[in-house]
Image (cartoon, rainbow, N blue to C red):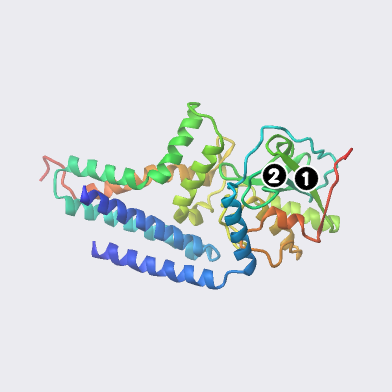
Amino acid sequence: MKVIKRSLAFGALALVLLIGVNVLTMRPSTKELWRFMWAELGQGNFGVGRWDGEFNEFDFSQLEPGDIVLGGNTGSSWGYWTHAALYIGNGQVMETFLQPGTKPEPVTRYNEYYSHAGALRVKLPPEVKQRAVERALALEGRPWYLLASRSSEELWYCSKIVWWVYAQEGYDMDPDGPYWIVPDRIARSPLVEQIQPHGR
Amino acid sequence: MRLIMRYVGLLAAMEVVFSGIAFLLSDWPWLAALAAPVFVVLVWLTGVALAADRGCSRRATALTAAFIATIWQLPGLQGSIRFLSDTAGWTEYDGVTDLQDFLMQTWHTVFLPVLAHIGGRAGGYYAAYYVGLVLASPLLILLFVCAALWKMRRPGRA
């Protein structure tokens, strides 16, 4: 029992030290995001928000491989957009959720499960976008983890995939951003422009 | 009851501490992956220590160990039960399933750096790491009970 208690005490000490280092090196934008999420929580907004049960009619027919697809519901903790994915062509996006991990899914999901949807065109040459798509495809099966750090190449969440595939090409869509890459910050990046749907 | 709560508290503290370490070391994946085997060894040693502390029959020790481990693993076990229930069709996947899965995953953060290396899918949909998360709580309960019985003699044997 002595060994167990000593190991636990040693582990707790290591944890406190690691927390201390992380708090001391926290980016100002991470503190801002925490304040934002805390304020949203105070207004009853939590997590990915609430789907109102209505389909949205965003037209995804103009998408090209390498575009970014966005979805959102009202009442989210972290902004207007709550989910992001990379369009890989043939009506499919590369995205990640907890149960299936990283997996290609039909883009029509974004009409069915989100109150509002949108798309962004990345203002980069087609060959860069093609390489970004190939990088995304190579992540198939990788785990979803909401608390994944930017630099971890093992754990992923939706907007981190979108950010990472372009960051690897030397184009950072959120250079001074917080610990979490939130879809709203990607939507505000100067590297992207909104795709207007047909008839709108 | 005090003995049970002491062991539940100790095991829960271990899981929280080693999950926290694995999370904060996630930028150094191989270092983070070390947290899982250390944690498993400590769980085993705690099970062995329970048998020495309890000092009663094999059956009573097994029941006590199973009870302790089940309470300790409730945050993970609820996700495993929900998965079984959804799969069997007794409940339907919904927003609550997401929250339950998230709690299960956060509870088992200690295993994520290891599970991240397992590729493939189960049933065409579930990622292999998710299946690992679903199995983690039942396997930890089994490990703890086996550790508690490890050094106990079987009745009728010399």
Which comes before the other along the chain, label 1 or label 2?
A: 2
- Position in image of residue B116 (x %, y %): 53, 53
Q: Position of residue A87 (x, y in %)?
A: 76, 46
The residue type indicated by label 2 comes to: Gly
Residue at the front extreme of this rendering:
A43
Residue A107's image quarter?
Answer: top right
Residue where numbered disc 2 is placed: A72
Q: Closer to the camera, A91 or B92?
A: B92
- Could you say where residue A178 lies in the image, as x and y percent from the top left? 64, 63
The three-letter amino acid code for the residue at tag 1 is Gly
Which label was assigned to residue A118?
A: 1
Check the image and report above or below for B64 versus B111: above
Total numbered badges shown on the rendered structure: 2
The answer to which of A120 and A102 lies nearer the viewer is A120
Disc 1 + disc 2, Cβ < 8 Å: yes
- For residue A193, the mark is none
Question: Residue A82 placed where, x, y %?
Answer: 67, 48
Q: Residues within 10 Å of mark 1 (few under 14, many from 20)?
A: many
Q: Nearer the viewer, residue B40 or A114?
A: A114
Residue pictured at 44% horizontal, 51% vertical:
B107
